Amino acid sequence: MLVWDNARIHLTAAMREFIDANARWLTVFQLPAYAPDLNPTEGIWSLVKRDIGNLAAADRGQVTRAVKHRLKKIQYRRHLVDGCLTGTGLILDC
């Protein structure tokens, strides 16, 4: 499954070729060009930024470690992930 939000990289010829070449098994959901309210990932990043927003990092490595640490904490708190999906109004049908 590919959620396609019309980002510039999704508009390249290479991406179109990839989609066409894999159409047999690949399902593409196309979102408007900018739709943070439909993208549960935006909710996850909001949680990460809330936690590290005041981090005075000495280098990029420290930022990377802080982001990875926060994402790991979110991963084990299913209600946070579910909340980000619920906030979009979309339904995960498995």
Image: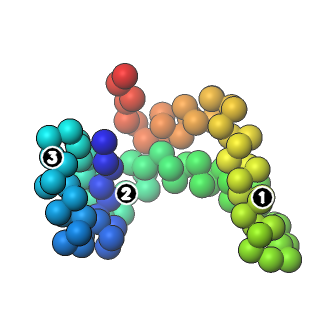
29 lies left or right of 42: left
Q: Residue 14 location, x and y as percent?
A: 23, 69
Of label 2 and label 3, which has the lower sequence position? 3
Q: Amino acid at mark 1?
A: Ala
Q: Which residue is mark 3?
A: 23
Residue of label 1: 66
- Nearer the observer: mark 2 or 3; the answer is 3
Q: Which mark is residue 15?
A: none
**Disc 2 to disc 3, how far (Cα)?**
24 Å
Secondary element type, mark 2: loop
The secondary element bearing badge 3 is classed as loop
Q: For the residues labelled 2 and 3, say whether their Cβ atoms are less than 8 Å apart.
A: no
Q: Residue at x 22, y 59 (%)?
A: 18
Residue type marked 2: Ala
Residue shown at the point (62%, 54%) measured from the top left:
46
The percent coordinates of residue 34 (x first, y second) are: 36, 63
Q: Which residue is mark 2?
A: 35
